[in-house]
Amino acid sequence: MGQNPRPDRSRRPVRSDSWSPERVRDRLISLQAAIRETVTANLRSQQADVLSQVATERGGDTIYALDVHVESVLLDFCEDWAEEQPLILIAEGISEEDEEGRVTFPRGTPEKEAAFRLIVDPIDGTRGLMYDKRSAWSLAGVAPNRGAETNLADIIVAVQTELPVTKQYLADILWAIQGRGAQAERQNLLTGERYPFTPRPSQAADLHHGFAMLSEFFPGRRAIVADIQDRLVAELGAFDDESRVRVFNDQYISTGGQLYELIVGHDRFNGDIRAHLMRARHLPGLPPGLAVHPYDICTELIAREAGVIVTALDGQPLRDRLGVDDNVSWLAYANPALRARLEPILRRLFAEHGLT
């Protein structure tokens, strides 16, 4: 992975606070800052046709050249942290010998001895960032090690950091510790100044003159997604005046980015049903070739702590196991009033298409 010589850590004392939520949060912020620095350097030094080359196909996703550059940063970080506490890293493409995308640190430690599981998407939104089109996000969540069944609902600390395009000098960092609300800051990458702000999801009770959408990033049964979206907004009155546009659609190819747009009040509803479209063999047309994996949505704790309601298609909390292969469908409403208005319609439309 990385060829840089590693420092001698053999004499490092074990910190007693290494598993405190605050210590975990600070560690994750530090990791993502290093990832951002590496990504920014590569964006500035290499052309899009180089960064967009396919490095390999592993597990459930494509690994691009831009993704490969951060692997050594992530592995070095985990080796360093493991000097304080054994951990399990879950991330796409980190281990060719482990198809499940899990590596225990220190290497060779039995999984049952790990204190926690760290699930990471170093670059969520590679496709937009490698062409310098739109920010990607670095995502990380930590859950106590509850064995193979550890799931998204077990995550107690989550951090996501913006990976901006080269012409952008401001970048946001968001984090949450379970039960303490969501926090955020905006950093000036030129001066290093940081400006705290409180995330505030939209409090609008309807979708009029706001952004709301289901993901249709890639080919595959997009007509079904479009039908559900059009019928939803029609029942909400978006077409009452045919000469006016009432609801807007923004396809941000980053699940972390979609959550961010909800958290800061830009979007009112967002969701991704590709996992169900992939499984529904009765539906016409070819299914989507890619869906959300648990690492793509490992920071949904931040959204929930900010007041966004995140659910599975059946309205229950997300409880997908922390791994790299499972496919996840999700829905997110900016506030309870929107959920109350949209969810019954969506549940009926999903049922009509045989998705629930």
Image: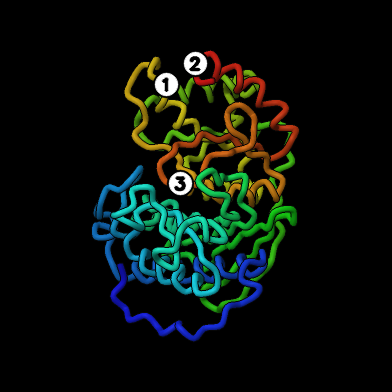
Q: Mark 1 points at which residue?
A: 280
Could you give the CA–CA distance between mark 3 and mark 1, rounded to whole angstroms? 22 Å
**Residue located at (25% from left, 55% from top):** 55
**Residue 63 as seen in the image, left or right of residue 304:** left
Check the image and report above or below for 193 versus 256: below
* Mark 3 vs mark 2, CA separation in Å: 27 Å
Q: Which of marks 2 and 1 is nearer the N terminus?
A: 1
Q: In the image, 251: left or right of 68?
A: right
Residue 354: mark in rendering: 2
User: What element does badge 2 sit on?
Assistant: loop
Q: Earlier in the sequence, mark 3 or mark 2?
A: 3
Residue 75 placement (x, y as % from top left): 40, 67
**Which is more toward the observer, 105 or 289?**
105
Secondary structure type for disc 1:
loop
Characterize the local packing of mark 1: few (<14), some (14-19) or many (20 or more) Cα atoms within 10 angstroms.
Answer: some
The amino acid on which the numbered mark 1 sits, given as a three-letter code, is Ala
* The N terminus lies in quadrant: bottom left
Q: Look at the numbered discs 2 and 1 and tell me whether their residues touch, using CB distance below 8 Å.
A: yes
Q: Position of residue 228 (x, y in %)?
A: 52, 22
Instruction: Tell me the distance, in whole angstroms, between the alpha carbons under discs 2 and 1.
Output: 7 Å
* Image quarter of the C terminus: top right
